[in-house]
Image (cartoon, grey):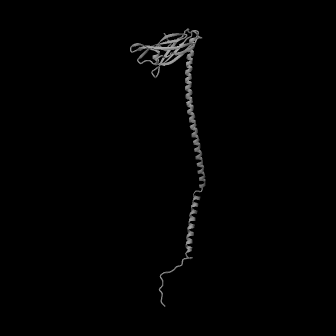
């Protein structure tokens, strides 16, 4: 018989003897993961025992903040409404004050008219027919002159005086005497006189233009109507003082 040399390779059977090792490793890994989860839960549980209460208080705080924001927005809207109402009230008050000032001025004018009327028709007043009681001029911003002519009559208390009023201005221009007619004062041709119709007195107002380099000295007022006519001359410097010549 021939002798066989021993083989260098050895066959090892793997089976039941090695499975328990893998199983044990899997169980150990699972146990380790469970222990980590348990530790994390315990840490969260005992490290913050009032976490649930804190979350509830957080939600309550958020609700309060939302309510306060809504209240602030409501207050802002109310403030805007009150400011608008205040502006309207101020504007209305300003308008009322202006209206009252106008009414006071009108009342003062009416009182002056009543006093003038009482003097005109009083028992001791001098009886006069149609005449120009006073002439007033005042400069205007546009370079024109505003005039106010007061006409009166108390001779016939039941009569209505009607007609037209014109006036001319006498003065000096370029070193010479000059007269500015009614048409020239209005810078038009064939200008109708200013109509009047009154029982006792009437104020006529308007505006006229004087030529450049013209120095006014006197105003000649002419009244013409069915009931008669009258012409009076007033010194320009004394215009408004009721001193007709």
Residue drawn at point x = 55 percent, y = 23 percent:
102
Is 97 situated above or below 155? below
Q: Nearer the viewer, residue 203 or 34?
A: 203
* Image coordinates for residue 231, horizontal then vertical, percent: 50, 10
Residue drawn at point x = 56 percent, y = 65 percent:
33
Is 43 situated above or below 9? above
* Image coordinates for residue 40, horizontal then vertical, percent: 57, 61
Residue drawn at point x = 58 percent, y = 37 percent:
81
Q: Nearer the viewer, residue 189 or 70?
A: 189
Q: Nearer the viewer, residue 2 or 115?
A: 2
Q: Is residue 169 left or right of residue 116?
A: left
* Image coordinates for residue 127, horizontal then vertical, percent: 56, 8
> Can residue 168 be seen in this snapshot?
yes
Q: Which residue is situated farthest in the left direction here?
A: 175
Q: Nearer the viewer, residue 138 or 17?
A: 138
* Image coordinates for residue 142, horizontal then vertical, percent: 46, 22
> Can residue 116 be seen in this snapshot?
no
Q: Which residue is situated farthest in the bottom direction here?
A: 1
How many marks do you count on the picture?
A: 0
Residue drawn at point x = 57 percent, y = 42 percent:
73
């Amino acid at each position: 018989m021939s002798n066989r040399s021993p083989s260098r390779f050895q066959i090892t059977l793997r089976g039941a003897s090695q499975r328990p090792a893998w199983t044990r490793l899997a169980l150990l890994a699972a146990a380790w993961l469970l222990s980590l989860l348990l530790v994390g839960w315990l840490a969260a549980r005992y490290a913050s025992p009032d976490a649930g209460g804190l979350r509830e208080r957080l939600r309550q705080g958020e609700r309060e903040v939302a309510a306060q924001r809504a209240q602030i927005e409501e207050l802002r809207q109310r403030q805007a409404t009150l400011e608008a109402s205040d502006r309207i009230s101020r504007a209305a008050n300003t308008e009322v004050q202006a209206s009252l000032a106008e009414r006071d001025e009108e009342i003062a004018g009416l009182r002056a008219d009543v006093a003038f009327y009482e003097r005109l028709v009083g028992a001791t007043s001098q009886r006069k027919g149609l005449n120009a009681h006073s002439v007033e001029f005042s400069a205007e911003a546009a370079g024109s002159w505003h005039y106010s002519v007061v006409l009166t009559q108390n001779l016939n208390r039941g009569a209505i005086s009607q007609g037209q009023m014109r006036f001319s201005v006498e003065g000096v221009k370029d070193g010479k005497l000059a007269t500015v007619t009614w048409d020239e004062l209005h810078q038009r041709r064939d200008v109708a006189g200013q109509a009047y119709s009154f029982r006792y007195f009437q104020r006529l107002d308007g505006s006229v233009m004087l030529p450049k380099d013209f120095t006014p000295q006197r105003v000649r007022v002419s009244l013409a109507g069915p009931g008669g006519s009258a012409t009076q001359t007033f010194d320009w410097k004394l215009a408004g003082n009721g001193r007709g010549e």
